[in-house]
Image: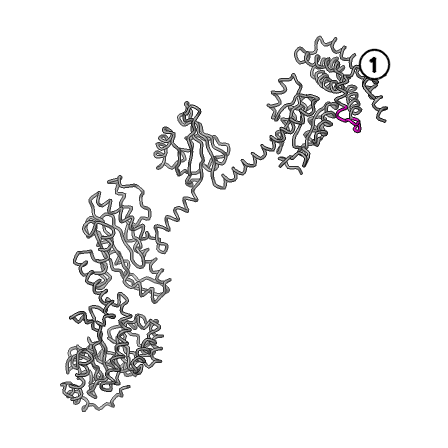
Amino acid sequence: MTPAYPLAVEPGIKPPEVLLVDDDEVNLLLTAIALRERGFAITESSGGEQALKQLADWAPDIIVLDAMMPGLDGFDTCQRLRRMPGYENVPVLMLTGLDDDASITRAYQVGATDFFVKSTQWSLLAGRLHYLLRASRTRIELERSKAKLARAQDLARMGSFDWRRHSASGLGLLQLSPEGLRVLGFLPAERVSLRNILRRVTAEERPAIKSWLRACMHHSTPLKKDVRLKMLDGSECVIHMEAEPEFNEHGHAIGYTGIVQDVTARREYEQHIQQLANFDALTGLPNRHNLVARMERAIQHARRLGHSCAFLLIDLDRFKIVNDTLGHAAGDELLMEVARRLRACVRHSDQVAETALEAVGARTHRTLEAVGRLGGDEFIALLPEIADDDDAQRVAARILEVMRDPVLVGGQECFVTASVGIAVYPRDGHTVADLLRNSDVAMYSVKATGKDASAIYSPQLAGQGRAKLELESALHKAIERDELVLHYQPIVDVRSARMSGAEALMRWQRGSTLVPPGDFIPLAEESGLIVPLSEWALREAARQARIWRDNFGFDDTISVNLPSRMFERSNLGEHIHQSAQAYGIPHRTIKLEITETGLMKDLQQVIPSLEKLKSLTVEISIDDFGTGYSSLAYLTTLPISELKIDRSFVQNLGITTESAGVVTAIIAVARSLGLRVIGEGVETLRQMEVLHRLGCSLMQGFLFSRAVPPDELQRWLQQTVLPRKAPWIGQADELRDGETAPRRLRRR
Amino acid sequence: MTASTAQDLQPAAAELDQASLQRLRELDPDGKNHVVERVLQAFDTSLQRLLPQGEQAFAASDRDALRHVVHTLKSSSASVGALELSRLCGDIENCLREYGIEGLGAPWAALRHEAGRVAGAVQSLLGREKAGCA
């Protein structure tokens, strides 16, 4: 079927098809002959009714109608065919008489494209037909291009409008393209005034939009703005409007012409980008960038209004452990839960009011109140207005409280506490950087004094912080500078009155002072320096064992204290192997001590390492036994060889009966599991005697020797033990003589 | 065959304008399509149909019907060179448009008479066309 709109009527390629309608046989015949001669394809029709019938299933490129015909004349025919679908725009040429003005007028009224006065000058008629066909093609192309534009505008959710000033109406005359109507949510062909549109503007924006429009129109400046409009379905759209003023030939502004575009989706993307830029992806809380901006604004407000604001730096106390032992997924889970709890502690608002500072007194700064994630396990609670320190401390207390509840992550209950450092503007700083640093100082002071608490910044804390920082950097260099030394405390077997090994204890020779382990080991653990420190200790112990072996045939063990995290490192065995090999001593010379608490805390991670060490013949000793919570079931399966009774029980021996009970129990457990047992912190002969009577003959403590440098230990051995000069030796001899039970063999 | 021989043979043929006939011939220079013959035939048929319609309309004082007859006849007679007939049709058409059917007795009679002469001329020319082209 021929399309209603012929795509192209190229003369010479396809002859233009003409429907010729005339009731006058002579004229019909003549015209047909003349036009065929000139390259047209003519279909003849003797009247209006017949023509309409022909058009029902065939569409010519052009229709030539005789105006005067009996029955349905040319005018009626034209009017009817214009109403037939597809014939709205087909060119129609009306043939009229020369002197017939009324017909010419009517021809246009009924929708004829043009008229032609009947003449026998056929080339004129042919020329007119060609002209109409070309105009029709151009028109069709224009229609298609318009349709394309409409489609493009539709895709871009865009439409155009014209607005003309109108003296009678202050709002002027508005004309919207169909696409424009659609964009603004009006019906097609709906008559829309500027007032209709303004009514759709959201109530809060309307006054501002109105005055803006007035100002633009008054000065004839270009319009460009995004406006929120309420749609009929209740939804809200963001419409981008852009228009240029138009001027008449006298230079007077006559109106605007421009476009409207629905940019709701784009706005949503922008908001999403904003979200990504300002909020932490994991917890959804404001991120560092957003927090700093909020803090800056909070400070500005506080300065203007003369009040205080507080920053609470919240750092989780045991997050690293969770992350390291349960994995990052569990760590993330924990952070999300923490974020959720923290949010509940303040009047958190994600949306910060855009209102600028001029709104003094409007208390808009309260919308700044929020909890955000600074990074890692650090959070900030921003309190934009506090009356005094108590306000901040109350929030801190609430935070500490909610954090104490166990968190279920990875199917395991975790106990995570927090340390909170508080800095208050303006007392503790005037800039975000200062206040952040000082809240950090306060937070560290909490960490240093036992965690799970809060502290307000004070300049003294800063001093401590600096000292600590210096200590940390000095400790870094201590290894390189050979400032670390190992002191050794002998372990004696009172039964044989001889040394059965030594415990290596780290000391830091910092200049002229000897720093005790309590002052730098916690810092080393916190900063991770404990790892290189421990590795150094293992190497150094191996070196010392070799020296002693060469000097006096040392063949016992040196115990080295290691934090549990060292046991989680897969290369611990390898490291011991290398140290032992370097100095030509057997692996078993090195014994490792881990505290009961450290062992139990990370049991699952530590066991594989213990197994591996056992295969290397490296023995494991459990330090401070009795202070933690050991599961007896675990003790039976762990590859350990020794329990060290915590000094607290030993010191009370002979004073409280409970101590003797505990020690008896520990010895019984050790015996039944085939483990050696060592009493620590033995200071008096009485303690020694009771311990020995209870069945423990391996001991260490000031009674025998404090921890001393290696040379001194050698001297002690040579001058005290071997000559059997110490008071405890005589006592030991007595005890041994009175003993009836079979002697336990010391494994070597 | 030329126009002058036709004139000599049949005086009635002089009623048809030679220039108009010439234009018809130009549409079909080699005569293959029998354009002149077909047009004359069509005119003759049209005339035989329209004249009685005109008589009837005139008798019934049907202005529109009469107007249609003279309008059609005006242009088709001009096409075949019956210029006098065409002029008479045009006059009646104008009178009808402006004054109505009254007072058209004489012009209509003149038209009827002229139409008779034209019909004769057309018949004669058709006879010759058919003979000439056979």
Please tell me which residue lies in front, B21 or A694: B21
Helix, strand or loop under label 1: helix
Instruction: Please identify the quadrant where the N terminus of chain A is shown.
Output: top right
Residue A539 included in the magenta stretch of the image? no
Residue A719: x %, y % from top left: 15, 86
Residue A86: x %, y % from top left: 62, 34
**Residue type at the position of mark 1:** Pro
- The region drawn magenta spans B25-34
From the image, give the main secondary structure of the stretch colored magenta.
loop
Pointer 1 chain: B
- Please give left or right for residue A109 compared with residue B76 in the image: left
Residue A440: x %, y % from top left: 24, 57
- Please give left or right for residue B61 compared with residue A273 in the image: right
Inspect this view and state whether residue A57 appears.
no
Which residue is pictured at 78% across the width and 16% down the height? B16
Inspect this view and state whether residue A321 appears.
yes
Which residue is pictured at 62% across the width and 18% down the height? A102
Quarter of image, res A704: bottom left
Few, some or many residues within 10 Å of mark 1 (<14, 14–19, 20+): few
Q: Is residue B12 above or below residue A422?
A: above
Residue A403: x %, y % from top left: 28, 59
Q: Is residue B90 above or below residue A254?
A: above
Q: Is residue A138 above or below residue A682?
A: above
According to the picture, the residue beneath numbered tag 1 turns out to be B11
Please tell me which residue lies in front, A80 or A225: A225
